[in-house]
Structures are given as C-alpha cells and as structure tokens.
Image: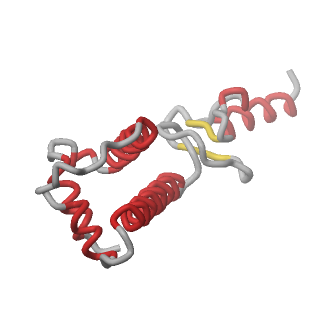
Amino acid sequence: MSTAAVCLAAFLVVSGSGRVASGDEKNSCGCYRTDGGNCYCDKKAKCGCPGECEPKGCDEKRQKEIDKEINAETKRAQESTRKHVGTDQSAASAAKDVTSEKRSSSAKPLTPAQLRELARLLDLYVSAHPDEREKGIEQVARELAHAPN
C-alpha cells in the first residue's frame, strides 16, 4: 500500500470520527445525529421534524405559530359572540357573558364544526402547556380571559 493511500485512509478516519458515515441517514429536514448525539443540519435544512434533529429555532417558531393561531381563533370567537349578542352590548360585556360561569339556559349549543374546532384548539393548547392538563376548562377559560395579549 502506498504512502498516499495510507494518508488518505487516515484522513478519512480522522475527519469522519463522530459523524455519520453517509448522508443517507439524514431526516426529511436535512439534519442528522452523530454517534455522540450532536445534531448537524445542512445549510438548506428546514423545520418540520418535531422531536427529531432539526435546525435551531424550530421549536420557538412552532410555538409562536401555535400562539398566533390560538389568538386568531379567540378573536374570531369573540367576533362571533358580538354578532350573536347584538350591537347594543359592548364587546367587553359580550366577552364577559361568554366566559362567565353562570350561563343562562338560553345559551345556543355549539354546532358539530364548532365542537371539532374547540377540540382541536384544546389539543393545541394542552400540547403547548402540558402542566395545564389537570385544570378544569372553566379555570383555563377564566385565566385566558384575564391574560394580557
């Protein structure tokens, strides 16, 4: 074996230590883990692999998107409540009526589509706030109604 071949083999062993042997083991985001557990991503790597190796900042970006969606759905629900309550009541009193614990017996039941949307939003909220899972829906609603935007 020539000296050049030995040097090349030594270089490949040294440069490849701690890294994955082939690019075939990259996930769909363009990232891979080394034998040491470190995460490396291509320059063109994208988010979309929660729980796996992905570029830095993806978790924060995902959380911001969830919070933004929850806020948008909350605003839509408040608008819908304002329309159903009537124009003579202010928006604050309409929101208070919706979130109050003492609801009148004339409250309209939710449609199946509204129930599915509520279930989806609750799942999003609980996945983002796992410590809130033990609270009752009334307590979470009160806290969200009084939370600053």
* Display coloring: secondary structure
Residue at the left extreme, as displayed: 102
Residue at left offset 57%, top offset 45%: 54
Residue at left offset 41%, top offset 35%: 112
> Would you say 122 lies left or right of 104 here?
right
> Would you say 79 lies left or right of 56 here?
left
Q: Position of residue 42 (x, y in %)?
A: 70, 47
Is residue 80 or residue 30 the one in the foreground? 80
Whether residue 65 is situated above or below residue 2 in the rendered picture: below
State the image quarter where residue 3 is shown: top right
Q: Quadrant of the N terminus?
A: top right
State the image quarter where residue 124 is shown: top left
> Would you say 145 lies left or right of 116 here?
left
Whether residue 130 is situated above or below residue 13 in the rendered picture: below
Residue at left offset 74%, top offset 34%: 12
Say how many tags the image has.
Answer: 0
Q: Position of residue 51 (x, y in %)?
A: 47, 38
Is residue 36 or residue 9 the one in the foreground? 36
Is residue 80 or residue 9 the one in the foreground? 80
Q: Position of residue 84 (x, y in %)?
A: 38, 61
Q: Position of residue 57 (x, y in %)?
A: 52, 58
> Would you say 94 lies left or right of 58 here?
left
Residue at left offset 16%, top offset 54%: 104
Q: Quadrant of the C terminus?
A: bottom left
Residue at the top extreme, as displayed: 1
